[in-house]
Image (tube, grey):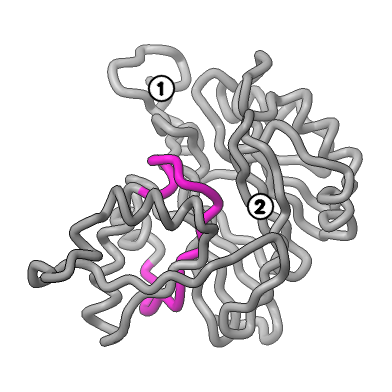
Amino acid sequence: MSKAGSIRLTFLGTGTSQGVPVIACQCEVCTSEDTRNQRLRSSVLIQSETTTVVIDTGPDFRQQMLKAKPQRLDAVVFTHEHKDHVAGLDDVRAFNFKQKQDMPLYCTAQVETALRREFHYAFAEHKYPGVPNLEFRRIENKPFKVGDLEFIPIQVLHHRLPVFGFRIGDITYITDANSIEPAELEKVKGSKVLILNALRIAPHVSHFNLTEAINLAEYIAAEQTYFTHISHYLGLHETVSQSLPDSVALAVDGMEIWV
């Protein structure tokens, strides 16, 4: 880390639940050789001078960690329990081994229930050697700290499922949302960077589409907005980018921002 006092955010993945390319799909996005159209499942790495946190551990978590090369991980913060946001949790055991301590998991009671079910072997009375060592830390809709990073939860709805976005300093990260109440949007105002899901062109039952995401970005009026959780139905990166307002861009895997 450099830039003392700053927060670095790395987009580990910017794709939707199937990633891009989609298995067996021959559309122009999935067959594109432009690496900006190749998207792992959505996740971000947040780093300060003293603290490193991942938001969500999707199915590509191992691959993402090998690319980003963090030397430690202080905690995982979860937005919700869907498989494309939790399926890679087992691989935190590499950090268990290196750091000689359990991995703190910051999540709601609902997410904890799902993780205990999905990774039951990690919570068995008699554990098999080598399973991940995990420690739950319950969060609700109020601020909490991980090291020197303060997280302000933003309650959103993913169709009918409650999901948390998070504001960390001047960055707000919201994925898997199609509805945000006005009181929650007040927490977002004043963010310098807004990261928001924009799934596709057509309307969707549980995600903002491109038009809805642009409208929300213009309402919040952050200095810069990045769209993430992108499907192949959104279109080619280069084509879509040309249609966006000046302060809005499509995120790509591996992109780093400092705030």
Asked whether residue 240 is in view, the answer is yes
Image point (56%, 32%), residue name: 230
Q: Quadrant of the C terminus?
A: bottom right
- Please identify the residue farthest to the left as the structure is shown: 129
Amino acid under label 2? Answer: Gly
Question: Which residue is drawn at the image coordinates 42% and 24% (left, top)?
Answer: 32
Q: Which residue is mark 1?
A: 30
Residue 243 picture location, percent across and down: 76, 25
* Magenta span: 69-86
Left or right: where 93 falls relative to 147: left
126 up-or-down from 153: above or below: below
Using the rendered view, name the quadrant where residue 153 is placed: bottom right
Point 18% across, 59% down: residue: 121
Q: Is residue 100 or residue 109 the one in the foreground?
A: 109
Other-residue count near label 2 (Cα within 10 Å), few / some / many at <14 / 14–19 / ≥20? many
Viewer-proximal residue, 56 or 70?
A: 56
Is residue 49 found inside the magenta-colored segment of the image?
no
Q: Quadrant of the N terminus?
A: bottom right
Which circle's residue, 2 or 1, is located before the other in the chain?
Answer: 1
Which mark is drawn over residue 165?
2
Mark 1: which secondary structure?
Answer: loop
| Residue 254 in view in this figure | no
Whether residue 71 is in magenta: the answer is yes
